[in-house]
Image (tube, coloured by chain):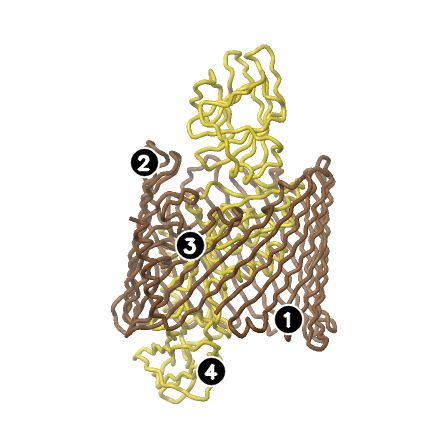
Amino acid sequence: MKKSLILAAALLLSAGAADAKWWLFGKSNDEVGLKYLYINSVSADEAGPKIKVFREALGAGGLVKITGKASTGKGAVGSVRISLDDKATWTDVKFSDNGTFEYAFKPEQGKTYPMLLEVTDTAGKTNKVEETRKEISLSEENIQAKVKETLDAMFAAYNTQNLRKFMGYVGEDFAGDKAILERAVKRDFDALSSINLRYTVNNIAAGAQGRVFVSVTYNRMVFVNKTGATSTDSGATEFVFDSNEGKLSLFSMKQPLMFGLSDAENVATGAVLGNTGAALFLDDSGSLGGAVRTLTLTNPDWTANTRTITLDDLTTQLEAGFHAVAIGDIGLDTNHLPLNTYAEAKLVTGKALEQLTLADLSASSGWTGPPMIAGSGSSWSPGTVFGIRLHGAAYYAIEVVSNDVGSLPAFTMVVKVRSF
Amino acid sequence: MKITAALLLLVFACNTAKAQSEFHASNEFSVVGNAINGAGKNASSLTKGLNYLEVLNLYGSGSKGAWNYNYTLGGKATDDLRNDAKKISLTNVQGRATNSVHTVTVGDVFESFSQYSLATSLKGGSYRFSREGTKLPEITGIFGWAYPRWDSVWKDPVTRTISRQAAGLRVKENFGGDLWAGASAVSAKDTGRITAADQLYDAKNYTFDFNYLPMPGLTADGEYSASDADLSPSAGAAKISSKGTAARFELVGDADPSRVSVEYENVEPDFYSALGSASPDRRKIKTKWRYKYSKKVTVTSGLLWYRNNLDAGSASGTTSSWKPELSAAIKKPFSSRPYSFADLSYKFDRKYGGGSSGADHYFNAGYRDRFGGLDSDTNLGCTIYRTKTAVRDAKEVNFNTSVNSRHQVKSVVLKPAINLGTWYSADELANETDKLYEYSLGLGFEAPDAYLASDLRFGQNILRKSAAGTDDSKKFFASLNAYWRPKLMAELNDSTIFLRAGYNDYAFTTTSRNFREKSVTLGVNTAF
C-alpha cells in the first residue's frame, strides 16, 4: 500500500508541475479566470446554477461566504468585483497578492441573489463573467422539513422501483460507493415487489460542514418474488446526507439497511449503536435472509445422543451427552435442544421456516437460556421450528424435517437451518 | 451525570429562546385508523386500531452584541409502537452561538471531521476557533456520547444502548488558499454492557486529510487514518487489540466538456472507526469519465475494482469484483421532437473468489417525450445473472411506461396518469419462470383558489409463479391524498389539513394468507 501512496503522490506532484493539459480539457492556466470558487464551502464547479443555503448551514454571523482565487496566467490580478444583483451594481473585493479573495454577505429570506464575479488583470483583460453566474438564495425550508422531503422522495422512488430517480438522491461521494449501491438496489428491485416502507424521525443534527445526520425508526413489508412470501421488519437506522444547492444527497448508511439489501456488506459503513442484529438482507440468489441449508444429524458410534451445531458456519460436531454442550452454539437430539453460553432458544408456532422474518423473532418474547429446551413428547415432530438467538443479536431458525428414532441412542435427524 | 448534562442543555436552549429575534415552529399532528382483516392479517406491517403521531419542531435565532445564536428543539409523541418504541421522545436539541471567531454548539453536535475519523452526530458539545484572514489554524474540539437518540442518554430501558463516550480534536490549516490540511484525533470508549455478549470498544483514530487545487479544474483530496482499538468481545473474555490503517486518495479534473475522477482506497481488515464511515478489508480503485460529446450527448464511463481479504487471513479466500459501466444520455435524439430524451446504459458486475463466481450484465434503455399534451416516460431493462457456482442463473426483464398529462379547466387543474409495468424472470437453475404485472391509474386535482390539492390512485400488482408449492399473489391498492389550506389558516400561518386514505387487498393462492388493510390518516400541519 505504501508503494501505491508514493506512486499517487508522485503523480500528483508531477501533475502540478506539468504543462500538459490533457486532463484540463480546454482550461488553460494563461486565461484570466478563477482557479477555484467556493460558496459556503461548496465548490462552484460541483454546484448547479441555483444554490440554496439552509439557515443551519450559514457561517458565523449568518453570512454566506464566497472564497476563491483569481488566476491571470502570466499577468497580475488588477481587480476582483462581485455583483449580487445581476450586474446592476458591482462591489470591489479585496484580494491578496496570489489572487485569493473572500467576500461575505448576509442573505435575506425570500430574496434571490444573482451572483457574478469579474476578474481583470493589469492589462485590462477580463474573465468570462457569465460563466461565474450563480443564483444564491436562502432556503425557506428548515432542515427538518428538507430531511423529511428527501426521505419521502427516496422511499417513494424505492417503493415504486424507480432506479434513476432513487440514484438521483445519492451523492457521488457515497461512502459505500455509488456504483456498488446502484447495482445492489437494482438487485433489490429484481428480488422484491410491493415494498412498503414507513418511518418517523428520531434525531436530526446539521453540521457546519453542510452534512446532516438523521436517525429514524422504520417498519416495512416486502414481497419476495422468488418465494412469493411476505416479510416485515422494524428497527432504527441512521443516514448521513450532504447538502448542496438546497438539496440533500445520501452520503452514508448504517446497518440495518434501508436500501441496497443485496450487498449489505459493501453498502453499509458501520452499524447503529444498539442494533439488535442484521435486518432484512438479500443473498446472492435473490432470496431473503440467509439461504436455507439442510443438515443431517446421525450418531454412528451409538454412544452419544447429541450433535452440536456451530451456527455461524453450520458445522456439526460429535458431542457426548447433552447436559454439558461445550462445543458449538446449540446441540440437537431427538427431543432436547441443549444451549451453550449466550445462546437462547424458543419454540416458534404458526410459521414455517421460510415464512419466518427477523421481526417475528426479534419482537418475540419467551426466550429460554442454557441449559436446554426439553420436549414434552418422546421426539421432536417434523415441522417443529425453533428460533435461536446468539449473543443477544444474531438470529437463526431451525426446522425439523424428519426425526427417525431407531433404538436409542441411535437416531437420524434432518433439519433445515436459516440465518437472519 | 448525563441526565444532568442533558437538562442543562435544555435549560440553555430555553434561556436562549427568551432573547430570540426570530422564531419558527412547525407542528404536525395526525390520527391514523387502521383496520386489518383476513386470515393472513399477521403479515401486515400496520398497527390495528386508532393511533396518533405528534411531531413538533422549534427553531429560533437572533443576536446579542457580537454574538449570533440559534437553537432547535424537537419532539414527537405516538402511541403506535411500530412508529416508535417510546410514546414521548425528544428528537432534537441544539443550541449554537457564534461570533466572527468562536462557535459553541451544545446538544446535537455534528462536526464531520473527515470520513474515517468522525462522521456521526454526538450528544454533547463542541467549540470551534476560526479567525478568518489570519494564518491561525481552525481548531475544533468536541465531546459527547454517540447515542442515536436522546432517550438513550437517560438510559430509558426501552431504548437503552451501551454508552459510547467520544472526544475529538481537529486542527485545520489553510496554506495560501490552494491547499488545506487537517489533523484529527478521535477517541471512543464503550461502557455499560447491557448483555454479557455486548462488544465494547476502546478505540482511537489519528487522521490526516487534505485538499489541494494544483491548477484550475483539478482537485486532489485524500485522507490517511490509523486506528488503535481494544475490543472486549464479551464479559470476562480477554481483550483483543488491533491496529490498522485506512487511506483514500482522489483526483478530480472538472472542466467542460469533461469530468474525470480517479479514486484509490485501502482499508485494512483491522482498521476500526467507531465514529467514522469505512468498509473494512477493502482495496478499491475507481475511475469515472463524464464527457459532454456535444450539447445533446453526454457519455459516462466508469470502472470500479475492489477486493477483500487484504491480510490473506480468510480461510475462504479472496473475493474480487470488477464493475465497469458505460452510459449515454441524449437530449433531442429526434431533432423534430424538442422534449425527447433518451438514455442507454450497460453495467457489468464480475465477482469471483472466496467460493463465488458470477458475471452479471445489466442493460437499460429509457425514453422520455411529450406527445401533444401527454408526457411519457418509458424504461426497458434486462439483467442477466450468471454464476459458475449455481447460485443464480437467470434472465430478468422489466418494462415500465407512464403517461401523464395536465389539463386546466377554469381554475381547476386535472392531472391524469397511467402507469404500466411488467417484470419477467426466467430462473435457469430451477427451470421456473415468474411474471409480475402492474398497472395503476391516477388523477391529480388542484384547485388553487380553494387551496385544495389531491391525488387519487389505484392499481394492481399480479405475481404469477410457476414453481410448485409457491403462491401466486394479487395486490389491489387504492390511495387518496388530499391537502387543504383553509384561507383563514393560510393568512395566520402556513397550515395544511391533510387526509390520507389507503386500501390494500392481498390475495394468495393459499387463501389462508389473504388479508386486507384499510388505513385513514387525518392530520394538520402548521408552521409559522
Do the residues at pointers 4 and 1 share their chain?
Answer: no
Do the residues at pointers 2 and 1 share their chain?
Answer: yes
**Which chain is tinted brown?**
B
Q: Quadrant of residue B123?
A: bottom left
| Mark 4 vs 2: CB contact within 8 A | no
Q: CA distance from mark 4 to mark 2?
A: 62 Å
Q: Which residue is mark 3?
A: B90
| Picture coordinates of residue B524, whole percent (x, y) | 55, 62
**Amino acid under disc 2:** Lys
Nearer the observer: mark 2 or 1; the answer is 2
Which chain hosts label 3?
Answer: B
Q: Residue at x 59, y 68 (%)?
A: B298
Q: Secondary structure at mark 2?
A: loop
Q: Is residue B104 visible?
A: yes
Q: Which residue is mark 1?
A: B331
| Mark 4 vs 3: CB contact within 8 A | no
Q: CA distance from mark 4 to mark 3?
A: 51 Å
Q: Which residue is mark 4?
A: A128
Crowdedness near tag 1: few (<14), some (14–19) or many (≥20) residues, C-alpha within 10 Å = many
Crowdedness near tag 3: few (<14), some (14–19) or many (≥20) residues, C-alpha within 10 Å = some
Nearer the observer: mark 4 or 3; the answer is 3
Which disc, if any, is residue B239? 2
